[in-house]
DNA sequence: TCATTATTTCGATAAATATAGAAACATGGA
DNA sequence: TCCATGTTTCTATATTTATCGAAATAATGA
């Protein structure tokens, strides 16, 4: 990951509404939620929600998938892992640092 | 960690200069670097650097320690761990998710 | 096709942020 | 005490960002 990329990604999360959206999607697992459902749960206006989803999507933190007339958004776990790796890169010049962690989605059995 | 806190923390990192400062300090380990040294390495003006260090410090991502007439800044690893935990909280409703990682400073033997 | 529902774009406004030169403020040594 | 060095605050400016109402754009089912 490059610096520019990491900044985009961090900026995407550094905002109340977007952080709430992302965390909600992380909790939902791979299935995700439709835009309308997200807006309902978080009480965010249509235009505002669309704006923020675009930001998150552009950063690669979430992905969209069409299903009927609904668009489902879900968290992209790999992107978060890449960020964690970048932030802890060369920690203490590589000496005695606990390796960075990994976040993976559930195995698909979760509802 | 609370949402407001996490946003502050992410916003602190979501900026070219500050991300560079933080990563530099992570790589330096607990010893850290003096303000002047940071400014030299990253080619940042005094006022700008001071502004950014204040932001990082306020977010708790770095800490300062006076030594002679120098002020050394170093990374606060615990704060980063708290953030990682927050971001991955209740992932997939707790089902089958890899637990969040941990980042720890070197054991003190690194120069 | 037409009506309905879901989502995005447009336009405009208010607020926050990054930047740096210059001045002010510490701190330690002579 | 006075000087030199290191760091922060002040002031001002240009840029970016969040927000939402209203209109526009898809996509589906009848």
Image: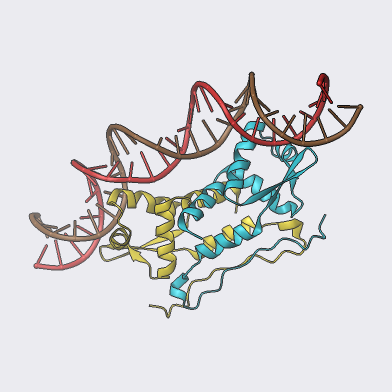
Chain colours: A cyan, B yellow, C red, D brown
Give residue B87's quadrant in the image: bottom right
Q: Residue at x 74, y 57 (%)?
A: B92
Q: Residue at x 60, y 37 (%)?
A: A51
Indicate whether B36 appears above or below A47. below
Quadrant placement of the C terminus of chain B: bottom left
Horizontal side, residue D14 vs residue B107: left or right = left
Q: Position of residue C6 (x, y in %)?
A: 75, 35
Q: Position of residue B74 (x, y in %)?
A: 41, 64
From where the camera sits, is residue A30 visible? yes
Quadrant placement of the N terminus of chain B: bottom right
Q: Position of residue C17 (x, y in %)?
A: 43, 42
Horizontal side, residue A93 vs residue B101: left or right = left
Q: Residue furthest bottom?
A: B109
Indicate whether B14 appears above or below A40. below
Q: Residue at x 74, y 37 (%)?
A: A36
From where the camera sits, is residue B57 visible? no
């Amino acid at each position: 990951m490059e610096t520019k990329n990491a900044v985009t990604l961090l900026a995407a999360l550094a905002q109340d509404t977007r952080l709430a959206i992302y965390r909600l999607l992380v909790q939902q697992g791979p299935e995700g939620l439709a835009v309308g459902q997200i807006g309902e749960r978080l009480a965010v206006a249509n235009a505002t929600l669309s704006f923020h989803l675009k930001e998150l999507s552009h950063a690669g933190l979430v992905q969209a998938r069409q299903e009927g007339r609904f668009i489902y958004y879900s968290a992209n776990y790999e992107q978060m892992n890449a960020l964690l790796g970048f932030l802890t890169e060369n920690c203490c010049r590589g000496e005695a640092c606990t390796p960075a962690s990994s976040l993976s989605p559930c195995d698909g059995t979760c509802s």
